[in-house]
Image (cartoon, helix red, strand yellow):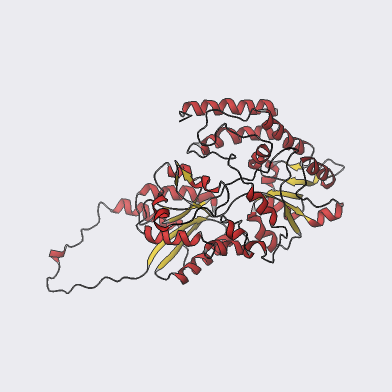
Amino acid sequence: MQIRQWQVLSILVLAALLLSACAPVAPSASDADSGAAEMPADEGPVTITWAMWGSPAEVATHQSVADAFMEERPEIQVEIAAEPWGDYFTKIRTLWASGDASVVPDVLFLSPIQSYASEGVLENLDPWIDKSGYNLDDYWPSLMEFATHEGSVYGFPRDIGLEVLYYNIDIFDEVGVPYPDESWTWNDLLAAAEQLTVVEDSGRVSRYALGMEGGKFMLWVMQNGGAPLDDMRNPSRCALAEPKVAEAMQFFKDMMDNNYAMPPANLNQAGGDAAVFQSGQVAMIIQNASRVSAFNAAGMNYDVAVVPIPDGGQRAAGAGGASWVMSALSDNKEEAWTFLQWLQSTDGGQRIYTASGEILPALQSTARSDAFLNSGQPPVNRQAFIIEGENAKIGRTGYFAEWSELNGSFISPGRDQIFTGEVSVEDGLAAICEQVDAFLAENGFPK
């Protein structure tokens, strides 16, 4: 099966729009030779287009999923349209803007769902779910919130992007630090970090204890009982200036200031958390299951544990994940729905993605099966994912259409100013809340 190139699709969209006015008119039935016999329609397989972002390795996994489906259902052909993350969303919006159903993919990988659903480009899946009896109860707690808009389901999360603590066994053994376990608190993490961090006489940090992407700071906030907003579905005010949030932010800021945690800006410049973990520049990272296949391919000696929590705190794994959706413009909705159900079944796509090692499956039945827990591949302590999944909570992202703009315009830039030391934790959080409250008021919240 050949991968569709987005550049070709974009040209086709433009060409269709430009040529439609000058295209010759096809002869009508009355113009045809009245003596010609009618030819029967060729009823071959129906082709649907399936779009996603991903690396070449990830696209290869998607292709294996499509091949397995087509072997089971040869009456439906699946054509993949893949693109790197940086270009994917712009090109999807370009195709939707054309209004041409023939070039818009039938099934897509998208996030955040609320933003697209509010624009009317996604198919409401409620009628399809009701008609087929598709079971939503198998998804992890709170996960379907991520694919719901105004009470209706618009997508199925492929996986749950909750984080665990990855640690390099060789480095821990070298330093003599006990491996992390469920009993670890923030204090245990700090004690281990002090031993794992290596600072040269010149002041250069040759090894940080921890590497964590900046956007994951909300994990600390949620563990400590805080939240970004007073209501993540219909907010009335910012909650980031509250003491529990400041305490959590200060915890991570102190880790960076003490050279225990690599600053997120440095992490990005060094190639991301996977790169610094594989190179030994950090002894631990906090990340979801997406790194497992790369670390296994590299032959790393590592394992995972639950993320340490504060004394008196809570586990607060994020219940979120990009979702498979159906385009509202699709001309092949029956076939697209058949494919969606198969993708999100333990015997179908979920099994194949899980076996690839690239995801923690969205379906609990798949995650608790041998395909995940007894795969024969590292990490050994896969139960850590299950524990975090059982404690997944809503609250780290907003479940309303304006969340992406709110987060991208105010929360993330303000967070970065705190991390770089441009402002203090308290002043920075207060400034964020001032902007967030103004945004909420301007956009009519609470609604």
Residue name at image x 67 percent, y 64 percent: 374
| Residue 414 percent coordinates (x, y) | 62, 32
Asked if residue 70 is positioned above or below residue 196 in the image, the reply reads below
Q: Is 106 left, or right, of 168 in this rendering?
A: left
Residue name at image x 60 percent, y 43 percent: 393
The C terminus sits in image quarter: top left
Q: Quadrant of residue 150?
A: top left
Would you say residue 164 is visible in this rendering? yes
| Residue 303 percent coordinates (x, y) | 74, 57
Q: Is 154 left, or right, of 406 in this rendering?
A: left
Asked if residue 271 is positioned above or below residue 293 in the image, the reply reads above
Residue name at image x 70 percent, y 43 percent: 266
Marks counted in the figure total 0
Q: Is 447 left, or right, of 437 in this rendering?
A: left
| Residue 97 percent coordinates (x, y) | 38, 46
Q: Nearer the viewer, residue 325 or 421?
A: 325
Would you say residue 423 is visible in this rendering? no
Residue name at image x 69 percent, y 64 percent: 377
| Residue 349 percent coordinates (x, y) | 53, 62
Q: Nearer the viewer, residue 1 or 407?
A: 407
